Amino acid sequence: MRLKDKVSIVTGAGQGIGAVYARKLAEEGAPVVVADINETKAKAVAADITAKGHEAFALKTDVSDEQSTQALARQVLDRYGHIDILINNAAVFSTIKTKPAEEISVEEWDGLMDVNLRGVFLCSKAVIPHMKAQRRGKIINISSGTAFNGKPYYIHYVTSKAGIIGFTRALASELGEYNIHVNCVTPGYTKTEIPRGTTTPEQLKAIANNTCLKRIGVPEDLAGVIVFLASSESDFMTGQTINVDGGDNFH
Ligand SMILES: NC(=O)c1ccc[n+]([C@@H]2O[C@H](COP(=O)([O-])OP(=O)(O)OC[C@H]3O[C@@H](n4cnc5c(N)ncnc54)[C@H](O)[C@@H]3O)[C@@H](O)[C@H]2O)c1
């Protein structure tokens, strides 16, 4: 129970890796807000967590929309009176169709950036005033190992994930004096229940082979680092990027 009563928001927690973060934080005692644009899926994840005896509720949220992110923070504060942890996990990811850079339309580029970068900014912006006032908070941003290895054919995605590393460093510099920690995690390829077309079976084999541990990651492989960064165990760490990929990239 390392996160007992630490009110946590996990964006994009309706499926995939975010759902596992939400479950893991709840198991550690955190009341968890499952924030996702897909309300049906968010409700299912929250119901599953509460059925196991933990505290969670779903809030339909579009992280790219400021009214929605402000409403998210307001509703969480109305319900619990505080926000301790924000996991900026929502992204346009599993729906991406890979293609050469010159074939990505401006609409695709902007649509992805609206979620992957503006979303991280807007969710952080919504909780910062409250975290500043309570002089405590943990913001954890989810980037990607693709920012290190420059994986081709989804340059908008890789660019957005590289941006999150700079965002993390700058925000950590701004908020440190308020005892607000801002850190970043770069997962490697992580297999979830959602099928996706960004990696061919051959590439997947090559990724597994390139890791020191010779296997592909699963969401549970990431959850321990998220709990660590959300807990007081990481209280002298901020502005950092932790790479969790079985030793695919070295960072
Ligand atoms: N799975 C991997 O291999 C991998 C690797 C590196 C990084 N990541 C990162 O981890 C995070 C989770 O990955 P995943 O595989 O679970 O992705 P996913 O595509 O399966 O899930 C993304 C979630 O975000 C939600 N979402 C999308 N747009 C939204 C919006 N505007 N507002 C609110 N929610 C929105 C979706 O509904 C979905 O539930 C992402 O940030 C991704 O970039 C994943």
Image (cartoon, rainbow, N blue to C red):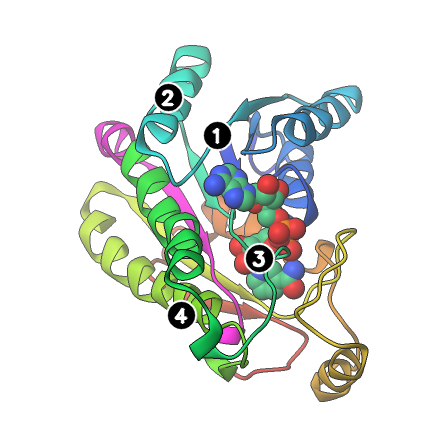
**Which residue matches tag 1?**
61
Mark carried by residue 231 = none
In this orientation, which residue lies closer to the viewer: 175 or 202?
202
Left or right, residue 127 beside residue 226: left
**Which residue matches tag 2?**
71
Helix, strand or loop at label 1? It is: loop
**Which residue matches tag 4?**
159
Task: Indicate which disc, 4 or 1, sits on the residue closer to the N terminus.
Answer: 1
Residue 7 visible here:
yes
Q: Position of residue 76 (x, y in %)?
A: 44, 20
Q: CA distance from mark 3 to mark 1?
A: 17 Å
Tell me the mark number nearer the camera, choosing from 3 and 2.
Answer: 3
Which residues are drawn in magenta?
A: 128-147
User: Magenta stretch containing residue 158, yes or no?
Assistant: no
* 1 and 2 marks in contact (CB < 8 Å): yes
Whether ligand 1 has any atom under 8 Å from the Cβ at mark 3 is answered as yes
Task: Indicate which disc, 4 or 3, sits on the residue closer to the N terminus.
Answer: 3
Helix, strand or loop at label 4? It is: helix
Question: How packed is label 3: few (under 14 Cα within 10 Å), some, or many (20 or more)?
Answer: some
User: Magenta stretch containing residue 139, yes or no?
Assistant: yes
* Kind of residue indicated by mark 4: Thr
Q: CA distance from mark 4 to mark 3?
A: 13 Å
* 3 and 2 marks in contact (CB < 8 Å): no
Please, which residue is most extreme toward the top here?
Answer: 78
Task: Indicate which disc, 2 or 4, sits on the residue closer to the N terminus.
Answer: 2
In this orientation, which residue lies closer to the viewer: 102 or 128?
102
Left or right, residue 195 beside residue 92: right
**Which residue matches tag 3?**
93
Task: Indicate which disc, 3 or 2, sits on the residue closer to the N terminus.
Answer: 2
Give me the residue at 54% from left, 84% from top: 250
* Kind of residue indicated by mark 3: Phe
